[in-house]
Amino acid sequence: MYNPKSMKAEEFINHEEIIESLAYADENKDNLHLIRQILDKAKERKGLSHREASVLLACEIPEILNEIYDMAQQIKKDFYGNRIVMFAPLYLSNYCINECVYCPYHKQNSNITRKKLTQDEIREQVIALQDMGHKRLAIECGEDPINSPIEYVLESIKTIYSIKHKNGAIRRVNVNIAATTVENYRKLKEAEIGTYILFQETYHKKSYEELHPKGPKHNYNYHTEAMDRAMEGGIDDVGLGVLFGLELYRYEFAGLLMHAEHLEAVHGVGPHTISLPRIKHADDIDPDVFDNSISDEIFEKLCALIRICVPYTGIIISTRESKEVREKIIRLGVSQISGASRTSVGGYEEDQRPHDTEQFDVSDQRSLDEVVRWLMEIGYIPSFCTACYREGRTGDRFMSLCKTGQIQNCCHPNALMTLKEFLEDYASEKTKKVGEKMIESELNNIPKEKVRKICENNLKEIENGKRDFR
Ligand code: SAM
């Protein structure tokens, strides 16, 4: 049997094992006795292995599917409550020396305008994002050691953290840049990044090599080992992801879970987040090439199963998905969404979305105020909280908070306080009204009376102008 602890990530996430797991899943997809055993194990909320999870993914028995959805909703409620953390991407540069065939930033694409933000332009973008109410960013960058070396990324992070504008400040910068060295990860850690995010794109090595025909990203092993190097460099919050649509989803699902198993076994902590992006139309990309796109129904099933299989990992859905899809999928276990995103390099300060530097089409084009109001109207608390990371509760320290169920006494009041700040500083009258009502009723859901009283006091102080309770 494969041992996640003694093997390198790319050895452990092994083609033969994935193929065997899928065959095992096919053989057992109607085996009610085994499926019941797996569901009973899932109820313990300690997660499932990739083999067990693959059986549930293959199963099409309607009652079992309903049980999976119910369990995912319950786990989400118990571990994450009804909070949804908000963030926005900030594209720094679209210069790229890779040739990823699904990405318009690929080197050969001469249709798009190449652009790299200067530090002054970053300042403008960040102020525009702060003016919407954002506190958490994910910086994105094409891979180009000449145009956007690590020094540029580090300087940009420093710039972002340094900008204090009205009541705004970006409190957490997550980073989505290409796989790099331990030394560079150490520098990112020193620059106080939040999560290091890197999508695997696909766990199918042969497809990976075909989809990334040239450039440093072609090296599957180097890419797949990136999270181990990041953790060696001291980053303990890492975010995994697969770009669904590139390869067959059952294969990717098993690979993704094996990656999580590997991190947990070797580093003692699994992924902080898992992103679920689906391939989107983009410039210079032939939509007919990607025929592995998954339906909304399969997307929902994947999300619910990830919630069950890695209960302590946040799930991220971006504005690649429409309002309708987001509405359905949020209840199945999503914990973070982006809002008012622009995938162009710059453009947050412009009224119209620029398309010439854009990475892909954004389906959910609503403003942050609209997204925040919508979330509250469907029963979720939009949270701008970044407290865990700023208090050093990362990696296994965050996981233990989650595992001991203390999130309701800690994250819930923090969510209410940061929502209150948003309502005071950035919300429209309509959103403020909905928000005030929500805060009033959600205060009752703080279990400890002492904590509730502190939260009530802090909310009053926020009304009187105080910000950033820690
Ligand atoms: N350059 C970094 C790297 O190579 O990992 C990451 C930055 S890239 C801006 C972020 C992600 O966008 C990629 O990892 C990929 O999964 C996703 N992406 C690329 N093309 C896409 C498309 N056409 N539709 C949806 N997502 C796409």
Image: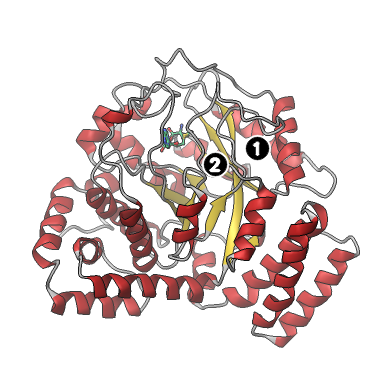
Residue projecting furthest to the right: 464
- In terms of depth relative to the viewer, which is nearer, 225 or 114? 114
Label 2 close to label 1 by CB (< 8 Å):
yes
What x and y, as percent, mark residue 324?
48, 53
Q: Secondary structure at mark 2?
A: strand
What x and y, as percent, mark residue 49?
26, 65
Residue projecting furthest to the bottom: 449
Which residue is at 48% across, 61% downward? 330
Q: Residues within 10 Å of mark 2 (few under 14, many from 20)?
A: many
What x and y, as percent, mark residue 284?
39, 21
Quadrant location, ligand no. 1: top left
What x and y, as percent, mark residue 111?
47, 14
The N terminus is located in which quarter?
Answer: bottom left
Where is mark 2, residue-wise?
A: 175
Which residue is at 61% across, 45% downward? 366
Disc 2 marks a residue whose amino acid type is: Val
Circle nearer the N terminus (2, 1): 1
- In terms of depth relative to the viewer, which is nearer, 344 or 268? 344
Q: Residues within 10 Å of mark 1 (few under 14, many from 20)?
A: many
Judged left or right of residue 20, residue 247 is right
Number of the label disc, if any, that sits on residue 442: none
Where is mark 1, residue-wise?
A: 157
Confirm whether residue 135 shows in the render: no
Which residue is at 51% across, 21% downward? 95
* C-alpha span from label 2 to label 1: 9 Å
Disc 1 marks a residue whose amino acid type is: Ile
Residue projecting furthest to the left: 27
